[in-house]
Image: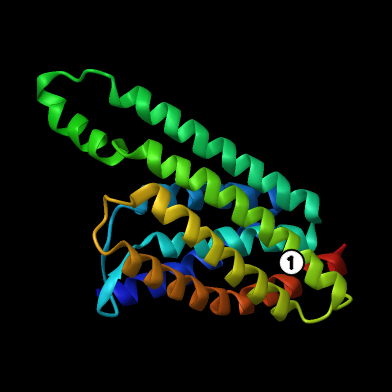
Amino acid sequence: MSNELLIIFAALFDLSIVLIAFRLGKSYVIGVIVVNLIMVSLAAPKVGLVFGVVGSPQTIFYASIFLGTDLLAEFHGKKSGYQAIWVGFLALALLAIFGQVVMRFQPVPDAEVYGNAFSTLFGSTWRVALGSFVAYFVAQQFDIWLFHSIKEKTEGRHLWLRNILSTSTSQFIDTLIFFPIAFLGVIPELLSVMMVAYVLKFLVALADTPFIYLARRMNVAVIADQ
């Protein structure tokens, strides 16, 4: 399967998982956000060609993070959206700390190849974690603020507008912050990677709009059943 098809199918699957989590309850949505946030950090160093330019598969997982926080902000209130941010922040901190602990654990000779693989994965964790901390915190705070600002100004109308504008703008901020902190001097053609990452994130912001409308229908159906 090509990288392009892989990203498309994986993103649609991941967005569908968010909807299932939404149907189960807000704690499940927060859980999915945390898993995707961890995958963003782990997948970021892996780059490949996407539509002829260098891109990263981490874009797949950003979609669900922003959809999840927008769903929480829309249907459970701004407080739940901020709660998800802090839970995700804690998860990243623990990932960075525990990753460094495991890296320093001395393996037996027969298992050294696995230890080296782990060290390769987590060797730059501190930069990735720092970039993730700053970008995630700033972008998500801005996302929830802008989402609710547009909601108030439009008096609750035009869900598609606040979803697309808040997500696309926040992902632009996230891209500008994360990549230079995590990979400046590490990944070649960093500007190209950033551009491709944002274009894909913007397309996903458009693609996740039907999912948030499906969530609204699901929410109405749940209320009707009660």
Q: Is the image coloured rainbow, by chain, by secondary structure, or in one colour?
A: rainbow
Position of residue 50 relative to residue 125, above or below, is below
Q: Residue at x 49, y 31 (%)?
A: 94
Residue 184 vs residue 13: left or right? left
Q: Amino acid at mark 1?
A: Phe
Residue 49 vs residue 43: left or right? left
- Which corner quadrant of the image does residue 113 belong to? top left
Residue 40, x across and y down, in percent: 43, 53
Nearer to me, 150 or 9: 150
Q: Quadrant of the N terminus?
A: bottom left
Q: Residue at x 14, y 27 (%)?
A: 112
- Which corner quadrant of the image does residue 5 belong to? bottom left
Position of residue 8 relative to residue 97, above or below, is below
Nearer to me, 23 or 171: 171
Residue indicated by mark 1: 147
Q: Quadrant of the C terminus?
A: bottom right
Position of residue 28 relative to residue 162, above or below, is above
Residue 17 visible, this angle: no
Q: Residue at x 39, y 71 (%)?
A: 195
Q: Residue at x 56, y 74 (%)?
A: 205
Residue 90, x across and y down, in percent: 58, 35
For label 1, count other residues whose C-alpha is less than 10 Å away and answer few (under 14), some (14-19) or many (20+). many
Secondary structure of the residue carrying numbered label 1: helix
Residue 167 vs residue 218: left or right? left
Position of residue 90 relative to residue 179, above or below, is above
